Image (cartoon, rainbow, N blue to C red):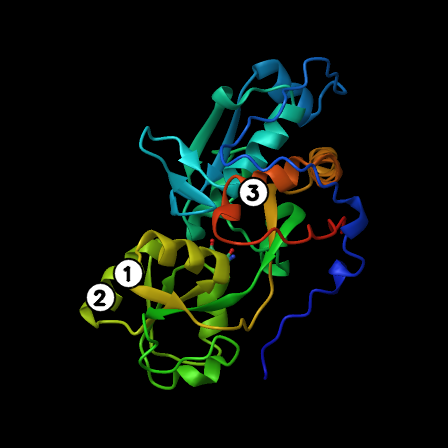
Amino acid sequence: MKFKKAFTAFAGLAAAALVLTGCSSGDSSEPEVESDVSFEEGTTMAQLNADQSITIGVKFDQPLFGLQGPDGTPEGFDIEIGKIIAAKLGIPAENITWTETVSQNREPFIQQGQVDLVIATYTINDERKEVIDFAGPYYVAGQSFLVPEGNPLGIDGSDPESVGDATICTVTGSTSEDNIREYTDNVITVDKYSDCLEPIRTGEADALTTDNVILAGLVDQNEGEFEVTEGTFTEEPYGIGLEKGDQEFRDFINDTLEESYSDGAWEAAWTSTVGDILPTPEPPAVDRY
Ligand code: GLU
């Protein structure tokens, strides 16, 4: 296989750090907001705490990770991670402004200061690190395919050559697009993953390719219509995007993630969202590059 991204920083997963809390209530309980915080003057943390508000870019159309709920507020694992970070900044969940980001506008939104953070199934990679920084990873996904139920073309998630001359739908500006173009030119692109479902229903496309957990959410949302192919062909470490060069903020978020691994908050975030359909994984070691 010519394309397999090595992500060696995961050696030594923080398995021992995961405290099993035994509580797995279906509903998300809001993380406790720090009331007694003090941050060094001039830091982003001090500014956000003083403002008592934070703006976070998330997905609005991806069940399990970031999906706009009936009242307009998004729900999912990325949302819960955002609440954990805000709580450590002394900011309650109701003071978070959730801004929709799609794959291609995540870096520009950070660079232009339209959001303080992006938590949006956002793969850490070197190209993106040229213009923004990442805390994390806080989860590692892998790219696969969503196909009509029964997988009529026999596409294999661990072998992207198996797409043959099928038409593959994916999203502009995603690693999913870059990765699949290594194997085929027969690609159509849209702004959001949910926009690939109709082309598959009409036969305009044969499959959707992106991260397995995004696909699992879409399959779950559209019962009986689609399935996710077995296997994956990439590693997609999900990071939290922030302004390039803000080392103190990045360290703070990495510390917060590690704490959430050991105090049970990360696991509770998973259980109340993705945990409805997928078992709890080990949290990955953060990469303080
Ligand atoms: N994780 C991949 C990326 O960051 C695909 C998912 C997405 O587009 O959000 O590009």
Using the numbered discs, state the Cα–Cα distance from disc 3 to disc 1 in whole angstroms.
27 Å
- Identity of the residue drawn at 56% across and 20% down: 92
Eyeballing the image, is 198 above or below 265?
Answer: below
Which quadrant holds residue 38? Answer: top right
Say which residue appears at 61% left-offset and 21% top-offset.
Answer: 48
* Residue 116 point in image, percent of width and height: 55, 33
Residue ID for mark 3: 271
What's the distance in space between the residues labelled 2 and 1, CA to CA? 6 Å
Q: Where is residue 151 in the image (x, y as percent from the top left)?
A: 35, 76
* Secondary structure under the numbered disc 1 in the rendered image: helix
Label 2: how many Cα within 10 Å (few below 14, some 14–19, many 20+): some
| SS under mark 2 | helix
Residue at the spot of label 2? 201
Q: Nearer the viewer, mark 3 or mark 1?
A: 3
User: Alpha-carbon distance for marks 2 and 3?
Assistant: 31 Å
Q: Mark 1 points at which residue?
A: 197
Q: Residue furthest front?
A: 22
- Is the C-beta separation of discs 2 and 1 under 8 Å? yes
Q: Is residue 57 visible?
A: yes
User: Where does residue 258 sit, x and y in percent of width and height?
Assistant: 74, 40
Image quadrant occupied by the N terminus: bottom right
